[in-house]
Each structure stands twice: as structure tokens, then as C-alpha cells.
């Protein structure tokens, strides 16, 4: 694949004289003038358009007119109607933990530093300015009005607490929304960096407080204004006022803070009351309370599903389960003009092989024998609930292209009095959102039925891996793991064949044919032109060759015990695995266990090109690109041969993840990374990952196609995928955790009657070697009212889209531009809502639509991601690694990744099975008398306050006091007491839902590792300078004011 694959094409390439949009262009590429683009330097904010004044929906008339389309939801603060209820639906309690109570326990403020005095610095005036702004900020919602406390006025008072605001403009019933008020006169907001100064850590020395100097407003409060940055009043996006391209630019981190844990701030003296701004936890808990534990039936088009954090039982009644498809909005704007106005990305996050819990129905398999699946003659869409039968059932109209098709005679059925086939409920393809078809030969490579896939284990046996004990660990594990290879539900044993290769500078293939007494090794030393030295005996059925394989696994560690070889090859390893699969004419997965930068003379040889000087320059993007082109060509070959590459990396230093991970990324594989792997500390995590991966349900040699009804189409795809053309998404394999995010744009007007229909079809080879089609259908509504679009947005899916599009854009754009576009797009979506959907209100009010209430906080978390923030302290490999992981994540995974789960565990209810309600990720929610568990899907921390009760410490660690706790441990001891057992079960529960095994890191308050933990308190200012939630909200509000002025 050429370098062009990285140039974000249509979405980023539309020139936009106004405000940079974030890849959410709509309409035909060349017709859009409203979307920013990543590639054109001219697009940088030169002339903010006059707000969203191109609105075709006059202010004040945008209320939903007439009855809402079926399935839309009225959102309200505390009440979330689940669309039309299913007749006959029985309430059904999910066996899982009951939803925790609505409100989390409150904790005393984190108080080891009492009321820090705000240092008196040169920035006093701006501080005062800011304080004025803040102290009159006020957040209104239907439910309550909460003010912030600020210096100078009514400190700590709740200005209007308890008095619900009435919305002024009564001509329309606005959706519930959150309003945050700024006083008149604050439209020219004080610099955001002042906000930051205000909230700065009290222990900062004065020199670090330059961030309080008034100057150009940066969304990043921490911005240290470097000299030379022209000061300017107000927030002028076109000034690129995020600072020069150096450390300290927008939302990047200021100079390193001196001192370690000492900077752990106490409560900030002057700032917006965090309880008054929208809480992600409250949103999550409200949804759990209203929808958790219930049956969610997918019987209504455009219905907004429960949040991804809410446990419920999903019943397929005609639309794909939200486990398979989630959308950024469930009501598309009917015209591209509207879409351009709102700039809400129209996207679906599709996880075609998502795991379903045992209490939900697995997919039915439809088999039409040699006839194969029934498809529309024109658009090739598969038979589905969106096909309308007519003429007594003899013909049907395609819901996607409207073509009238004949019903094949074998499929004919009469219609009932409402025009529905009488066999409607007997055929999954007529009544369900998701099902599978058995594919015919036409759907098979070379018109031949595929063979069952194979797994090839490829172990780096260079000096370091042997010496660390890793090779022995892997070999020992495989002896038992190979009994657990995945198989079909009814299958007695796995059809998957296995093969083994070891390598350092050369490759060793092993013949493990069952008839052999001993395995045989064949060395391939010509790594420039890899060939497979044996066909027969390389890929074997483990059960048949068990003794030879076990024998081999016993021998490998000894065989290389005396090795001095420290150099490794890498690309030839992948090549060899791929050639072996090709020769065996089957798809499969490679499991590569590798430690070092491949510096041996061979194709794909890499050098250490890590260069911190590139950070915050236009060349920073090169750090995310592969350093040699050969990996792209290799990836293409792998995809073409159905070879998926899973890579387990064990680096001690820079290994160029951006290059080494590339093939993994394009082949739908999974990348795992264990820095400084230590056998005793890290084996558990690695082996658990390996087991999960080997046992995962996977589709092989897959190709996905997304079809849509007329008026819109899929234009961009994000994921661990490969695209040879603009429509076919190729995946050498796709497992249950991989999601593809698909962006849609208008071609034409959409009809409110017929809605927007999406069909995703994945052709793949099953684990037993059967060629199948997995079909997911979902119908969305369309509306000419922007309010309908905003009402049905799903913030978690939006963040998934924004994360992936931004992480794709970093390959071709300066990070600064990517961040600016994210901020701007956030402001734009909210400004458009305010202008077109909200009732009139003071200009200074920040108004958040209910469904996007937590968009700013999540967006800020994304902006603080190490991928988007270049700092010398953050290893380049870590950034490339995070980028790669996020690109294939589903909505649940990105939600947790960007906003970690923080659980108070000192107050566990031992009698209940429930996981305690989470609390917000902020230091002030911690208490030194408590213990807290934090997990983001990749890392897990147990934080212990200095005054944590001795009983708790004894119960968890079996030591008498805080001082005795060792932070070396990566797991809790197995102790026979209810508290320990309860916590362990919570850990297991959290872990069970996540693809990556999280290593537990024990953190004691005020000890060094706490710095690491604090980076996950995402509502706070980041130690590297990312904005706090409060500050970011101010920043977004200022941008909105700019847009509306
Ligand atoms: Zn059609």
C-alpha cells in the first residue's frame, strides 16, 4: 500500500475558508465549503464564518414540528424513555449486578494540602479577570441551577440552588439541555491560560506560573506562554494562538513541573464548582437507573440504545443490536446543508463479531443451499427486513436502491393482511437485524471451499528472550493452550491447524508430523528471499501430532540455551508465515513473540529513528509513519492471503512500533506490548492476553461491505483494516473486539419516511473453514429538524469517531492542527445547537444539548491523549501503540479508555454483588482515608490513601499498616476474607469485559508512582499540562461565543 494510504483523503481534503471542521464533511467532496481539512494550510481559521448564520432553520422555529419520528427519544435529565415499548415485553432482570444506586457516595475532599494559597504573581490582573468570569458562571439545567463559587462574590454559595430555571423562549419545547451562564460582558473571555493559572498547582514556583500571563487564549490552560508569542485579546482562532509549534503549544504540556508528588494539589481555591458541570458519572448512572437490567428490543427505527456502560439484555427485533452497531446519531439530517450546518459526524461504529452474553440469542445461520443468499439485482444488498414484498409476495422492492426484484420461486410466500409475509417470523433474514448466510462457492477464493484456518507460532529465540525465560514461558504455555483452540459451537475438536517457527537472524521451521518420533528442524538462512522449506508436516492438527509438538516445545528453550545471537529479523518472519499459509491454501493467524528492533541485515531492517526534536514540529507525523515502505507492501500481501499478524512485543527500548505494528494494524491483528518484561511481574498479564487471543472467536479472510439506502453513502473507514478500493474493507481476520468506524455523507436529500438504512455484510471464513456472510442491518431516522438530530446523538460513539479520525489524521497533519480542529468542531456542534435548537438565552450562556452534555469532558480527555500531545517524557513507541489500539476499538473500549472507571473500594457493600458506583476522575474525589480502583482497559491502579483504615489494609494485603504495603506486587494476595474476595471478584468482572489484560499497579498516596496514576484523573489538569475539565469548558464556551458573535 502506498504512502497515499495515509493521506486522509476526502474528509480532510476539502478546503474550507472558515473554521476547520473535523473530518466530518458532508455531501460530495467538492461541494463542501464547510469542512476544514487537515491538509490545507489556508484552512486555518482565517475567517471564522459568521457563526452558523447559514442556518436554513430560522432561529426560534426549529422546534420539532409535528410528532417526532417513531423511535426518537425525548431526553430529559432524569427520565429516558425507551422508545415505544414492545408489546408483550416482559420486564426481565438481568442476572448481572443490579445497577448501583444513582448517586455515588461522597467523599471528603482530598485534603493533604489545605487550602493552598494562590501565589501572588504578575498575573494577578488576569486572575482577577478570570475570577470575575468564573464566579458568575452558572450552570442551568432543567433539574437544577448550580453556581460556582468564586473569589470576590458569594463564595461557595449556590446561587440559585434548588430553583429550576425556566427556559425563556417558550415557543419550542427544547430538548433538555444544560446551560452554563457567563455574565454579560464576558463574551470576550479572559485567556484560558489564565484559567489555568488560576487553577494552577499551589506548589508551583513563580516561574512556572507564566501561564497566568494574559495573552492569546489557549484552550489549554496550562499553556506556558513562550516569549515571542504575540499577546492578543480574546480568543482568535486564526491567530493560531495555541502557541508556537513547540512544547507549550495548545493543549500540550508546559515545562516539566519541578517536584514530584508534592504538586498534588489540594482543592483549588477559585474555580467553578465541579459539581455544577455535567458529570459523566451522573450520565452513566442515570442511564443505568432508567434502562439497566431491562430488555432492550431493537424494534424501532432510529431508536437510541442504552449507553454502552449500561447492562441490559438486547433482543433483536429487526435492527442490529447496539453490540454490533452504534451510531453517532440515530437521526440523520435530511439534507446535506443541514449536515454541514451542524457538523455532527454521521458515523456508525461496527463491531461485526462482537461477543454476546450467554443470555442473548446467538446469530441464526440461514442456508439456501446452492442458491445462496438472496440479493437485490441492482445494488446487491442481501435479503433483510428492509425489503418490501409486493404483488402478493411475488416481487419485492429493495429498501436500499428501490429496485423491484422477483422473488425466487423457492422463496415465495403469501402475504398477510398487512402485507407481510406469513413466514415473517420464521425467517431470520426477514425479521432480524443480524444473521448469517452460508455462502456458496461463488463467495470463495478461486471458487474452492476454504480449508480451516491455521495458527503459526513464531518465537524470537535471540539471546534476550532466552535469557529472560520468555521462550520457556511461551513454550510451556502452548502445551496446554493448544487444547483450547477455538471450535464451532457443536464441534468436538478444533479444526485449526498449528505450526511452529523460531528465529533470530535466520528462520527455523519445524516438521511436527504425527508419524515422526522427533520434530525436525529446517533452517532458512536466506532471509532476503524467504521460502517455506516444507509443506507436509509443518501445519498439523495438534491432537494428532500432540506428542511431537510437546516434544518440540520441550526442546526449543534448550535448543537455543547457549545462543549469543542478539540481532533479529522481523519482516522475513511475517513473510515466512504468510508464505506458509499461502502454500497450505488457508487463511490464518501468526502469533509473533518479538523483543528488539530488527537490525539484522534483511528486508524490513529498521534503525532507531526516534527523535524528540521532531515533537511539535510539522515532522512529528513521521514518527507515526513506518520508516520503510516494505511493511506496507508486506501488509498488502498478507491481506491478500488472509494472513493476520498478532504481535507480542517485549521491548526494553525503542522498537519502532509505528513500523513494526503496521502489518498487524492492516491485517486486523492485535498488538500487545510489555515494556521491560519481567518474568515474575509480567507473566500473568502476558499469558492471559495470549490465552484470550488464541481462544477468541474470529472471522478469517474477511471482506466487509457497507451498503446504504439512497441519499447517502459510506465515505471513510477507520479501523484495523485494509482498503484496496473505496468500498471494500478487507481484514485478514476480524475478532470480537475489533470495530470499524464508518463515516457517511449525503449524496442527496434523505426521505423522512424511508429513513436512512444501513446494511453491513461481512464475508468471512469461520473457524471450521466454512465460508459465511454475516449481515447486520440498522435503520436510522431522518429529519429536517436539527433538534431531532441532536436529541438522538450518542456521545460515546462520537468520541470513538473523533478519536479514530484524529488518530488517522496525525499521520498526515501537524498535531496542533488536529487538536485545533477537534476543539473547533466541538464548539461548532454546540454553537449550532444553541443557535438553532435552544430557546433564546443570554449570549453568555453555555448551552449543552442533553445528549452531548458530556461531550466537552470526553473531548478534553481525547485531547489529552498521549497520541495528540508530544512531550519528550512520553516514549514515541507508547504513542504509536496507543494510536494503533484505539484505531480498532469499539465504543465501549474507547469510552473506558478515554474516561477511566474510578471505584471507591473502601466502602464496598460486601452483601451485594454489585460493583460500586464509579466516581469522577478527579483528585478531589479521592480521600486519604480511602482506597480506589482505577481502570481504563489498558492499565489498572489500586490507589491507597495514607490514612486508609488498617482493617482494609490488613484485609487486602495481610500487612499491619500502610507503611508495610509493597508496591512491587502486581496482584493482590489470595486471602480468605470477604473484603479481599469481593475486591478480587470486582477485578475479575472489570477484566472479563476487556480485550487487554490489565496489570494491577499498586499506588500509595504521596509516593512517586502516584504521578503515573494521576495522569488518569482526566478531569484534572494533566501533569504534562492538559487542560482541566473546567478550563476546557471555558475554552469551548469562548469558541462558541466567537462563532455566534
Ligand atoms: Zn437494491
Image (cartoon, rainbow, N blue to C red):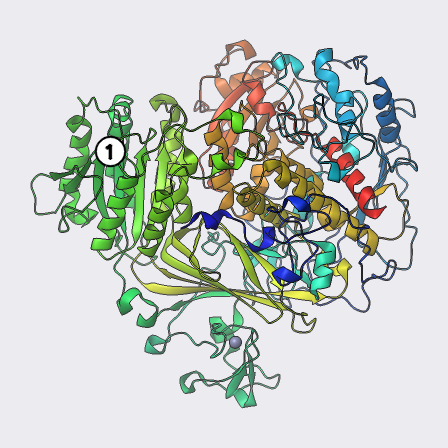
Where disc 1 sits, the SS reads helix
Number of numbered markers: 1
- Relative to 204, 866 lies left or right: left
- Relative to 628, 250 lies left or right: right
Front residue of 278 and 45: 45
- Report if residue 728 is visible in the image: yes
Measured along the vertical axis of the image, is residue 980 above or below residue 524? above
What's the residue at 74%, 60% (across, down)?
788
Q: Residue 479: image x %, image y %? A: 23, 37
Q: Residue 801: image x %, image y %? A: 59, 49
Res 999 quadrant in image: top left
Q: Residue 517: image x %, image y %? A: 7, 41
- Report if residue 854 is visible in the image: no
Residue located beneath label 1 in the image: 475
Res 590 quadrant in image: top left
Q: Residue 170: image x %, image y %? A: 91, 56
Q: Is mark 1 within 8 Å of ligand 1?
A: no
- Relative to 688, 568 lies left or right: left
Amino acid at each position: 500500500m502506498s504512502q497515499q494510504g495515509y493521506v486522509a483523503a476526502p474528509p480532510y481534503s476539502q478546503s474550507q475558508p472558515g473554521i476547520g471542521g473535523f473530518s466530518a464533511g458532508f455531501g460530495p467532496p467538492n461541494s463542501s465549503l464547510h469542512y476544514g481539512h487537515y491538509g490545507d494550510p489556508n484552512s486555518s481559521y482565517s475567517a471564522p464564518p459568521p457563526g452558523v448564520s447559514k442556518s436554513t432553520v430560522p432561529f426560534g422555529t426549529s422546534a420539532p414540528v409535528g410528532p417526532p419520528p417513531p423511535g426518537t427519544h425525548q431526553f430529559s435529565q432524569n427520565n429516558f424513555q425507551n422508545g415505544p415499548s414492545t408489546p408483550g415485553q416482559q420486564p426481565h432482570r438481568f442476572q448481572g449486578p443490579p445497577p448501583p444506586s444513582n448517586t455515588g457516595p461522597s467523599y471528603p475532599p482530598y485534603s493533604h494540602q489545605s487550602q493552598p494559597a494562590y501565589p501572588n504573581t504578575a498575573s494577578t490582573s488576569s486572575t482577577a479577570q478570570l475570577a470575575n468570569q468564573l464566579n458568575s458562571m452558572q450552570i442551568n439545567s432543567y433539574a437544577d441551577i448550580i453556581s460556582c463559587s468564586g473569589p470576590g462574590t458569594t463564595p461557595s454559595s449556590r446561587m440559585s440552588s434548588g430553583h429550576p430555571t425556566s427556559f425563556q423562549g417558550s415557543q419550542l419545547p427544547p430538548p433538555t439541555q444544560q446551560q452554563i451562564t457567563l455574565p454579560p460582558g464576558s463574551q470576550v473571555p479572559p485567556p484560558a491560560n489564565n484559567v489555568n493559572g488560576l487553577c494552577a498547582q499551589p506548589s508551583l514556583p513563580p516561574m512556572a506560573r507564566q501561564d497566568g500571563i494574559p495573552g492569546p487564549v489557549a484552550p489549554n490552560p496550562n499553556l506556558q506562554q513562550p516569549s515571542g508569542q504575540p499577546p492578543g485579546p480574546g480568543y482568535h482562532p486564526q491567530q493560531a494562538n495555541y502557541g508556537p509549534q513547540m512544547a507549550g503549544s495548545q493543549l500540550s504540556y508546559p515545562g516539566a513541573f519541578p517536584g514530584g508528588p508534592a504538586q498534588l494539589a489540594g482543592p483549588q481555591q477559585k474555580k467553578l464548582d465541579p459539581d455544577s458541570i455535567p458529570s459523566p458519572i451522573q450520565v452513566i448512572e442515570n442511564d443505568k437507573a432508567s434502562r439497566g437490567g431491562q430488555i432492550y428490543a431493537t424494534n424501532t427505527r432510529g431508536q437510541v440504545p442504552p449507553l454502552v456502560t449500561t447492562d441490559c439484555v438486547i433482543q433483536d427485533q429487526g435492527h442490529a443490536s447496539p453490540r454490533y452497531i452504534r451510531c453517532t446519531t440515530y437521526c440523520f439530517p435530511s439534507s446535506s446543508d443541514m449536515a454541514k450546518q451542524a457538523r455532527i459526524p454521521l458515523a456508525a461504529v461496527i463491531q461485526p463479531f462482537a461477543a454476546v452474553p450467554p443470555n442473548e440469542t446467538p446469530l441464526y445461520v440461514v442456508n439456501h443451499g446452492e442458491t445462496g443468499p438472496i440479493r437485490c439485482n441492482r445494488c446487491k444488498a442481501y435479503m433483510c427486513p428492509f425489503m418490501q414484498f409486493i404483488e402478493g409476495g411475488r416481487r419485492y422492492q429493495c429498501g436500499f436502491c428501490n429496485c423491484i426484484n422477483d422473488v425466487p420461486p423457492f422463496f415465495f410466500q403469501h402475504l398477510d393482511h398487512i402485507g407481510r409475509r406469513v413466514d415473517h417470523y420464521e425467517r431470520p433474514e426477514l425479521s432480524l437485524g443480524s444473521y448469517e448466510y452460508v455462502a456458496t462457492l461463488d463467495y470463495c477464493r478461486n471458487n474452492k471451499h476454504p480449508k480451516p484456518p491455521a495458527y503459526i507460532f513464531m518465537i524470537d529465540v535471540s539471546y534476550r528472550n532466552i535469557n529472560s525465560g520468555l521462550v520457556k514461558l511461551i513454550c510451556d504455555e502452548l502445551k496446554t493452550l493448544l487444547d483450547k483452540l477455538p471450535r464451532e459451537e457443536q464441534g468436538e475438536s478444533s479444526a485449526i491447524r498449528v505450526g511452529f517457527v523460531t528465529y533470530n537472524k535466520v528462520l527455523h521451521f519445524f516438521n511436527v508430523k504425527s508419524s515422526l518420533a522427533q520434530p525436525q528442524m529446517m533452517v532458512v538462512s536466506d532471509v532476503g528471499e524467504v521460502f517455506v522449506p516444507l509443506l507436509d508436516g509443518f501445519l498439523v492438527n495438534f491432537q494428532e501430532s500432540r506428542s511431537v509438538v510437546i516434544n518440540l516445545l520441550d526442546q526449543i528453550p534448550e535448543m537455543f540455551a547457549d545462543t549469543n545471537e542478539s540481532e533479529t529479523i522481523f519482516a522475513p518472519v511475517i513473510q515466512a508465515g504468510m508464505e506458509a499459509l499461502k502454500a497450505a491454501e488457508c487463511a490464518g493467524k501468526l502469533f509473533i513473540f518479538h523483543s528488539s528492533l530488527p537490525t539484522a541485515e534483511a528486508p524490513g531492517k529498521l534503525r532507531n529513528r526516534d527523535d524528540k526534536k521532531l515533537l511539535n514540529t510539522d515532522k512529528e507525523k513521521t514518527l507515526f509513519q513506518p520508516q520503510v515502505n516494505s511493511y506496507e507492501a508486506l501488509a498488502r500481501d498478507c491481506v491478500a492471503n488472509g494472513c493476520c499478524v498478532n504481535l507480542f512485543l517485549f521491548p526494553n527500548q525503542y522498537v519502532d512500533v509505528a513500523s513494526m505494528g503496521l502489518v498487524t494494524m492492516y491485517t486486523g491483528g492485535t498488538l500487545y506490548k510489555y515494556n521491560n518484561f519481567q518474568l515474575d511481574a509480567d507473566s500473568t498479564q502476558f499469558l492471559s492476553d495470549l490465552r484470550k487471543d488464541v481462544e477468541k472467536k474470529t472471522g478469517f479472510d474477511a471482506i466487509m461491505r457497507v451498503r446504504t439506502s439512497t441519499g447517502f453513502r459510506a465515505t471513510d473507514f477507520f479501523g484495523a483494516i485494509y482498503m484496496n478500493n473505496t468500498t471494500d474493507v478487507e481484514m485478514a481476520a476480524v475478532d470480537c473486539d475489533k470495530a470499524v468506524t464508518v463515516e457517511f455523507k449525503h449524496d442527496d436529500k434523505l426521505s423522512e419516511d424511508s429513513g436512512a438504512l444501513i446494511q453491513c455484510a461481512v464475508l468471512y471464513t469461520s473457524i471450521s473453514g466454512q465460508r459465511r456472510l454475516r449481515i447486520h442491518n440498522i435503520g436510522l431516522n431522518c429529519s429536517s429538524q436539527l433538534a431531532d438530530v441532536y436529541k438522538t446523538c450518542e456521545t460515546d460513539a462520537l468520541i470513538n469517531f473523533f478519536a479514530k479520525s484524529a488518530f488517522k489524521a496525525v499521520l498526515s497533519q501537524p498535531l496542533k492542527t488536529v487538536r485545533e480542529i477537534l476543539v473547533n468542531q466541538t464548539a461548532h456542534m454546540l454553537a449550532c445547537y444553541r443557535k438553532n435548537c435552544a430557546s433564546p438565552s443570554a449570549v453568555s450562556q453555555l448551552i449543552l444539548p442533553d445528549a452531548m452534555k458530556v461531550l466537552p469532558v470526553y473531548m478534553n480527555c481525547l485531547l489529552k491523549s498521549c497520541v495528540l500531545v508530544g512531550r519528550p517524557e512520553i516514549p514515541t513507541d507508547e504513542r504509536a501503540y496507543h494510536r494503533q489500539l484505539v484505531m480498532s476499538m469499539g465504543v465501549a473500549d474507547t469510552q473506558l479508555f478515554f474516561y477511566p472507571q474510578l471505584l471507591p473500594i473502601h466502602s464496598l457493600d460486601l452483601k451485594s454483588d454489585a460493583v460500586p458506583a464509579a466516581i469522577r476522575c478527579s483528585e478531589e474525589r479521592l480521600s486519604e482515608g480511602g482506597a480506589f480502583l482505577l481502570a481504563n482497559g489498558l492499565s489498572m491502579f489500586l490507589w491507597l490513601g495514607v490514612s486508609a483504615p488498617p482493617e482494609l489494609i490488613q484485609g487486602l494485603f495481610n500487612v499491619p499498616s500502610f507503611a508495610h504495603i509493597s508496591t512491587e506486587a502486581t496482584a493482590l494476595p489470595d486471602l480468605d476474607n470477604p473484603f479481599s474476595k469481593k475486591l478480587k471478584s470486582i477485578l475479575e468482572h472489570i477484566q472479563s469485559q476487556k480485550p487487554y489484560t490489565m496489570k494491577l499497579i499498586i499506588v500509595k498516596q504521596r509516593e512517586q508512582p502516584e504521578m503515573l496514576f494521576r495522569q488518569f484523573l482526566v478531569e484534572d489538569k494533566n501533569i504534562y499540562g492538559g487542560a482541566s475539565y473546567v478550563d476546557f469548558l471555558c475554552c469551548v464556551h469562548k469558541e462558541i461565543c466567537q462563532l455566534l458573535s
